[in-house]
Amino acid sequence: MKKLHLLACALMFSAATFAQQPNKSIAIIPEPVMITQHAGYYTFPNMIVVQAAAKPELTPVVDLLKKKFSTAAGKMVAVKHDNAEGAIHLVLAKNNDAQLGKEGYYLSVKAKGVTITANTPAGLYYGVQTLLQLLPNQIEGKEVAAGVSWSAPIVDITDYPRFAWRGLMFDVSRHFFTKKEVMSYIDNMARYKFNLLHLHLADDEGWRIEIKSLPRLTTVGAFNVKREGSFGDFIPPKPDEPRNYGGFYTQDDIRELVKYGQDRFVDIMPEIDVPGHSLAAVASYPQLSATPGADKYLVRSGEKIMDWSKPGHPALVDNTLNPAGEYTYEFLDKVIGEVAQLFPFPYIHMGGDECAKNFWEKSDAVKALMAKENLKTQEEVQSYFEKRVEKIVESKGKKFMGWDEILEGGIGPNAAVMSWRGVSGGIQAAKLGHEVVMSPTTFAYLDYMQSDKVMEPLVYATLRLTKSYEFEPVPEGVDPKFIKGGQANLWTEQVYNIRQAEYMTWPRGLAIAESVWSPKAKKNFNTFFTKVEKQFDRLNYAEVKYAPSVYDAIFTPGRNSDSTYKISLSTEVPGLDIYYSFDNSYPDRFYPKYTGALNIPIDAKLMRVVTYRGKQQVGRMVNMPIDELKSRVK
């Protein structure tokens, strides 16, 4: 009996010890500033009382709680404005807490309920987003989940963002995305505390915003010929093909999108890309061009219009606005005037990137402008244009922003720079005292391939999750006060639908979210990826598509001294096993396991590779042609 008593005590002690262990399931992205976990859980009652002040600005916060708990948990949510007992207390601090700033929060889960404290409604909203990540994954579902214990670990969290500018750019010009689809993109951004949607609204392929004083921008400029396949290499449309593919947002649509974003604490910044990337505008109003014959131009459908193999990427058709034409500035005054009225956000992005200048070089009007203004180079011509546009933007009460090309030829006095060609442009702008947002291709271009090119829509570069996570918005030697923050950019030449837009954004968007919100010292990829895998399950419940590319094998081909070929395999994340075949069959975990560099059999035509974690397949089946591997060996 004594032995049994000792055994029972030991079991009780073991259980008590286990209960004290931190809950390994906490997987918050972006990582909070501080998490202190305690023993136990708080279980939400069937009737959840939200205690909050009777302030209209708290409505979006309360609505988020109502939607999530009623939709996924099937619980009733009541709102009380007095000091009654409640499951969730939303508290606006009476005295401003300097540590929290405008978007920070304290989240405390106790045995009797939850308290979220912040200086602003935005802080409360982000606190709720964190609370949701403490709940079972099913909270992201679109229907009531049965058999779930709706509990959260007892925990204290202090959190606030590192940067005020935390953005995603969504190109809705190359392919049009509906208002409802943009709203879904906003919902997914807000889940991970992004606060800015940069909408790329005008390009060669489509003008996407109604300008009432210039109706042809949407009757003509918003539509092209539908093509599917590899964008950029399409056959030029025939004259009789219908131009009915595309669309645009009415001004009422824009107002609705702006309000939808505001209710999720996401601002929207419009971009009108000029003077390059302007074929849709020129096709609508040919007098914008400095080139004769522009009245024959059509909105691009994905055919080749620039030669990227040559310096300066000369245009095959003139897709630029005429910097020497007064009509250009009258046109932009109308556009910017109407855009400024629709978007409360203080900045308007005016593009400025990849402006081909070969047609300007031939233009008598541009030559005359250069002589008149003493401009020595075409870069100075673009600088002249940018400075005039900056004045127009400022005349409408807005701040001017452009891509880092606006530095060439001399930057305007108040211009903000978005650095995309690496970080060098941002460094230069910051040292000149200009505001900078970092969005370098090196880390933040979501249109880049995520896996091997045999697995992805072909783009000219690859950006893996591990590399995205290395994003650091403040380069060494730069005064942080000039770096407003960072963002990732999703260009959509090869993105035809919202599901593919989601696939390209997540999980790399999670890496960017943590890079712009979380303390730099807390970033750790291995820790981050354990959280990503748990977020995958949440995204499944949310019916959001994401890329599993991080599990795919990486191929590094080479040549032996006898001129035969070899292949080395690796994985982006540790702990995976790789299995392969050269005999055209489909490998599983009973096939040969990769342990070191392989000689490619002389007659092999195809290598198939798959990755496992233990007995579970995690990677996709990669079909790699041997000729493709050989072509990569220098």
Image (cartoon, helix red, strand yellow):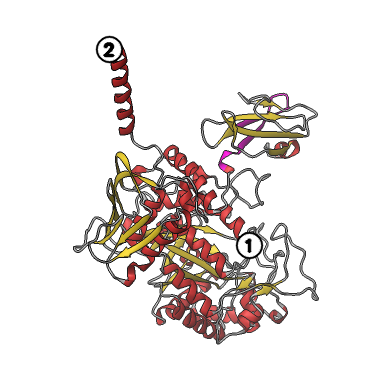
Picture quadrant where residue 154 is located:
top left
Q: Is residue 349 visible?
A: no
| Residue 587 percent location from the top left of the image | 70, 31
Q: Quick check: 238 above or below 21?
A: below
Picture quadrant where residue 314 is located:
bottom right
The overriding secondary structure of the stretch rendered in magenta is: strand
Q: Quick check: 66 above or below 552?
A: below
Q: Quick check: 77 above or below 221?
A: above
User: Looking at numbered disc 2 in the image, what kind of residue is underneath it?
Assistant: Lys
The residue that mark 2 highlights is 2
| Residue 298 percent location from the top left of the image | 70, 75
| Residue density around tag 2, few if under 14, some if 14–19, many if 20 or more, within 10 Å | few
The residue that mark 1 highlights is 313
Q: Is residue 160 visible?
A: yes
Which quadrant is the C terminus positioned in? top right
Outermost left residue: 95
- Does the segment drawn in magenta span residue 68? no
Picture quadrant where residue 206 is located:
bottom right
The magenta span reads 550-569
Could you tell me which residue is drawn at 44 percent across and 72 percent down? Answer: 259
Could you tell me which residue is drawn at 46 percent across and 78 percent down? Answer: 342
Q: What kind of element bears circle 2?
A: helix
Asked whether, in this view, residue 469 is left or right of residue 561, the answer is left
| Residue density around tag 1, few if under 14, some if 14–19, many if 20 or more, within 10 Å | some
| Residue 397 percent location from the top left of the image | 38, 79
